[in-house]
Image (cartoon, grey):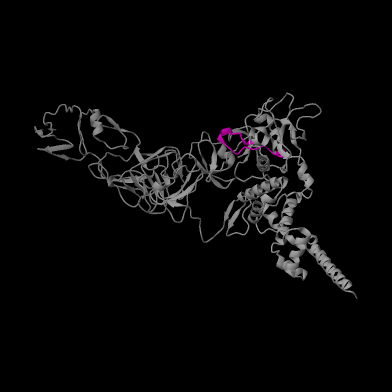
Amino acid sequence: MSLFHFFKGLYVKYLFKETSNKNVFDHYFFDLKYYLHQDASIENFAFLLNITSNKVARITSTYYNCSFQVLLNEHRCNHVVLELNNPVNSGLSMESIVKLSGFKSSEQYSDYLKGNMNKIKSGIKILSIVLVMMVSLNKVQSQVSIGVPVPSGSAMLDVNSTTKGFLPPRMSEIQRVLILKPDAGLIVYQTDGRKGIYYYDGTSWTYVMNQLNTMTPNETVVVGGAGASDNISTLGTVVSAPTFITSEWSNVGGFAGRLRTPRLIYGNNFDGTANLTSGLLSAGITSSTTLAVGGATTLSGTLTLPSLSTSSLLVTNGSKTVVSGSLTGDISTSGLTATLTNTGVIAGQYGSSTLSATMMPIVTVDAKGRITTITVTNTEIPDASAILKGLVNTITQTFAGNKTISGTLAVIGNSTITGTLLLSTVSPTSTPAVLELSSTTQGFLPPRMTTNQRDAITAPVAGLTIWNTNNKQLEVYDGSYWVNMNGKLVSTLTVGDDYGGGKVAYIFVSGDPGYVAGQTHGLIAASSDQTTVSTTVKWFPDKFYGATGTNIGLGLPNTISIIAAAIAIGTTDMSTFAAGLASSHRGGGYSDWFLPSKDELNKLYTNRGAIGGFATSGTIATYWSSSQKGTLNYTDFNSFKTGVTSAYQQFFFTYGVNSEGTQNDLGISNPRRVRAVRVF
């Protein structure tokens, strides 16, 4: 055998084996999609083919003109695009699609696109920018759970624990007040002063009331100023200033009593509901019999005692005293000393604890008409029309002074508290508080009502709080709308209402992206078009590459993609194309306006009468959506060169052969009308 034939045989044998290795390489890498494995590497692939890593690298370099890792990532990127374009994956998140394509995370995918942007041709570069933005958008919309494997579908943050709680930021009152430009919904815990949870409603800080207890025996209700003479206790007695009383009681308002028929006390009607004070004397009284004065009395007028032939008048003015004779009768004098004699009141106990309509506190008086004790045997004092013992429910009550009640305090009707109402077994801890609640075993139960009952409240005031039994949450009126404790809108809105910088165009229902049970969300349409007949704009300045979403919730991602593509080709004037013009709208001071998707635009058409301001005549009857017509073939580079040249429009009035409501596609260079929307 010649040397030539020997080397030729070696070369043929080598070439045959190299070709065989390449065929096995292609089978595993392409046919079986080895690149979709997240742990794919040149070492693992060489082990799979039973060849060395160097041979794998040589095949990759020889036949595909790149490294093995570059080949992996290129095919993974292509797979991401294919899966995004697959309708079956419409419910998957961007994170899921990236991982299904072999990347370990969306961060790895995004970093690869950014790091290799200079190697990508113009058409692919635009698509890459869009995909990076989609990955970023997906991160913002992802959910977080703590203590639970899968978060609730309506929760951005789902925390579950039976042994630990949520600890918000803690700070003093001064630190809370000094927070610069707090956002609506900001929550802190105040550690001093009026301790507790506070939230900012966009205008001011609101304290979240979180405790109240029903009363238990021997507890105290503080409703007025201090002073033993003003205390009423079901376990003790009260000694007050002298007053005049008879046993003919009439019931009024639960805790007080008066004479059934007023009596004349020295020319003045007196029914027992107030003390005889110097004010009566200041107003002037006339009597032909006896004058009785209890306590210190100041006369601001003239005291006339007619027909006192055997008595004299005692006058004191500063340091000067005139004494002439003595006074006799109910008041006897000896020099400057006056003695109160029997007033005609029979000493004893008055009132009754009997279960009847005349049940009153038992009052003990002495022979001189002074009340020595009051015993309250039951706080459930009926009104005058009651037959049996029951709660007062027809007369307005006023509580003043310190009142101590042992048992349960129940008030049905109107009650006025002068001072502080304390429901606790301890003394008040916050002097400025009107209502202080303290308990470690019971909570505060606010008014409970349905959404319809809440909406039927006439002229609610800011701060009004209820528990919504439909939404199962606390809700507060902020002066304009009902919101929950997170500041989310829960008021019932109607399509066409003025809200959020425009008109309510559509309210999300169950199944719509953005729907949250117990809250009110939907689409706001700008109050008028962003175009006129003379200023209509085209959909895009040139061919386009990727705004394929048509469903509700995809108008904003479409708008972002269109603007990114425009910037990529050098277009910076947002007023020259539909998505840019819609995004530039600033109705109500909001900056999150966008061009509606195909389905979102149809909601505007359906509710156009309530929204108002849409064109009804003229030569241009259609409005642009943000949804392009058709898709790209991501494996055919000619498709990228050609791009997408048409997008969906909708007729808002009949024009030519197209009836109102018709949706069809039109070349993207044609000028049409624009109406911006935003989500609330």
Whether residue 471 appears in magenta in the rendering, the answer is no
Q: Nearer the viewer, residue 24 or 471?
A: 24
- From where the camera sits, is residue 16 visible? yes
Which residue sits furthest right? 1
Whether residue 591 appears in magenta in the rendering, the answer is yes
Left or right, 473 with respect to 622, comes to left
| Residue in the image at 72% along x and 45% along y | 123
Q: Nearer the viewer, residue 535 or 304?
A: 535
Is most of the magenta stretch helix, strand or loop?
loop
Left or right, 361 with respect to 168, comes to left
- Residue 644 location (% of width, % of height): 76, 40
Relative vertical location of residue 636 with respect to residue 46 in this rendering, above or below: above
Residue 539, image quadrant = top right
- Residue 275 location (% of width, % of height): 28, 37
Q: Nearer the viewer, residue 113 or 162?
A: 113
**Image quarter (top left, top right, bottom left or bottom right) of the C terminus:** top right
**Image quarter (top left, top right, bottom left or bottom right) of the N terminus:** bottom right
Q: How many marks?
A: 0
- Residue 667 location (% of width, % of height): 76, 34
Relative vertical location of residue 144 with respect to residue 658 in this rendering, above or below: below
| Residue in the image at 20% along x and 27% along y | 301
Which residue sits furthest top? 618
- From where the camera sits, is residue 630 visible? no
- Residue 430 location (% of width, % of height): 36, 48
| Residue in the image at 77% along x and 63% along y | 59
Left or right, 283 with respect to 580, comes to left
Q: Where does the magenta region start and end?
A: 582-599
